[in-house]
């Protein structure tokens, strides 16, 4: 497949889609019924549905019994940790293998045509992939497991509001539908916080060393950032929920960053594209740092003036904004 039919490449080797990024006509006033109806299938499929389905499977087949979790024990916490390690290695590993080891589609639809450098002193172990795997497994998964284990213990002991499917089927379905949006809103708030200069310098810079990200870059973070990032589970300590809901949050937080950091617009199998990855917005964040803090459907960046749609006009606006900021600092 020729990606130049759908995009352009500049003289520095950066590819971009022809179509600028656009938010769906959902969070607007007056509401657009047609816009909402067009958005729902794209919102649910494929990824929200895949992670919801995965959460159900994990709940029934890969989670210790509720009774066992009434007391904190290394036995059941260890099982959850090993399960999360296996899921991360499988989901992220497949994407990394296909795109970066096998290089099955070369640089077709790759935003930055260059491959990550094998040796780079700015990374732990002088290697981007090893650095990313280290921070993901040594910091990310333990903290993900910690938040999940606390939620399970509280739920098992009746310390948080509980929701049963039989008694509240409508709220169960609606809350499940809202999980990705709640995750997105939480991510935006955390992301803006860790871009405060002092926090960025001491914490978030680890993630942003990945200016040419790959699948393992998604969860490569400082432990403090992991603590904040996985704290989205806290909302279910207050909102009545079923364990599948906070389990779904964990699956989204732990596994979905890989697809947002592939560095590719889409994955190609032969001449057919599959699992379209509209993550140009987040790639632009890694390239320019001060734009596109949010991911997904809620137009938070547009509301707060930090949206970059990938066009030359948006690039010029960012340039002028930086000039004004530098003038104020002087």
Image (spheres, rainbow, N blue to C red):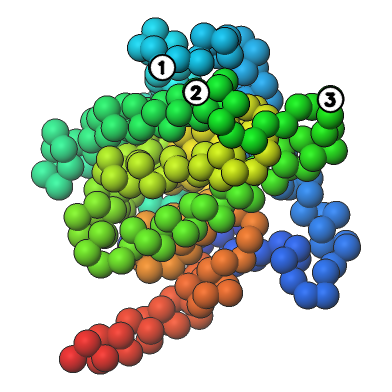
Where does residue 285 sit, x and y in percent of width and height?
41, 60
Regarding residue 96, the answer to whether it shows in the image is no
The image quarter containing residue 25 is bottom right
Tell me the crowding category of disc 2: few under 14, some 14 to 19, or many 20 or more residues within 10 angstroms, Cα based: many
The residue at the point 68 percent across, 25 percent down is: 53
Sequence-first tag of 2 and 3: 2
Regarding residue 168, the answer to whether it shows in the image is yes
Separation of marks 3 and 1 at Cα, in angstroms: 28 Å
Q: Is residue 280 above or below residue 104?
A: below
Q: Which mark is residue 153?
A: 2
Tell me the crowding category of disc 3: few under 14, some 14 to 19, or many 20 or more residues within 10 angstroms, Cα based: few
Q: Quadrant of the N terminus?
A: top right
Where does residue 26 sit, x and y in percent of width and height?
75, 63
Which of these two is toward me, 24 or 198? 198
> Is disc 2 placed on a helix, strand or loop?
helix
Where does residue 330 sit, x and y in percent of width and height?
18, 91
The residue at the point 15 percent across, 47 percent down is: 122
> Is disc 3 placed on a helix, strand or loop?
loop
Sequence-first tag of 2 and 1: 1
Compared across the picture, whether 22 is left or right of 169 comes to: left
Q: How many marks?
A: 3
- Contact between marks 2 and 3 (CB within 8 A): the answer is no
Q: Which mark is residue 166?
A: 3
Separation of marks 2 and 1 at Cα, in angstroms: 7 Å
Q: Which residue is mark 1?
A: 72
- Contact between marks 2 and 1 (CB within 8 A): the answer is yes
Compared across the picture, whether 191 is left or right of 250 comes to: left
């Amino acid at each position: 497949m020729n990606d130049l039919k759908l995009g352009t490449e500049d003289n520095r080797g950066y590819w971009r889609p022809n179509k600028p990024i656009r938010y769906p006509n959902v969070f607007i006033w007056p509401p657009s019924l047609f816009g909402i109806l067009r958005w729902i299938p794209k919102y649910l499929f494929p990824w929200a549905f895949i992670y919801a389905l995965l959460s159900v499977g994990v709940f029934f087949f890969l989670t210790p019994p509720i009774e066992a979790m009434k007391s904190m024990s290394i036995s059941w916490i260890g099982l959850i940790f090993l399960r999360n390690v296996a899921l991360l290695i499988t989901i992220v590993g497949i994407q990394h293998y296909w795109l970066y080891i096998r290089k099955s589609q070369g640089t077709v639809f790759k935003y930055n045509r260059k491959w990550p450098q094998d040796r780079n002193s700015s990374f732990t172990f002088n290697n981007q992939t090893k650095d990313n795997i280290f921070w993901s497994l040594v910091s990310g998964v333990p903290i993900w497991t910690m938040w999940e284990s606390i939620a399970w213990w509280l739920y098992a002991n009746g310390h948080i509001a509980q929701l049963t499917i039989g008694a509240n089927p409508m709220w169960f379905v609606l809350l499940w539908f809202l999980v990705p949006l709640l995750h997105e809103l939480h991510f935006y708030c955390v992301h803006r916080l860790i871009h405060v200069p002092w926090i960025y310098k001491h914490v978030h810079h680890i993630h942003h060393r990945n200016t040419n990200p790959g699948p393992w870059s998604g969860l490569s973070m400082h432990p403090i950032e992991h603590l904040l990032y996985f704290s989205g589970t806290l909302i279910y300590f207050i909102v009545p929920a079923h364990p599948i809901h906070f389990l779904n949050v964990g699956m989204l937080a732990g596994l979905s960053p890989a697809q947002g950091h592939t560095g590719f617009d889409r994955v190609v199998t032969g001449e057919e594209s599959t699992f379209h990855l509209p993550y140009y917005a987040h790639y632009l964040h890694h390239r320019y740092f001060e734009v596109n803090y949010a991911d997904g459907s809620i137009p938070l960046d547009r509301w707060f003036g930090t949206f970059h749609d990938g066009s030359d006009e948006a690039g010029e606006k960012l340039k002028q904004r930086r000039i004004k900021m530098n003038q104020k600092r002087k």
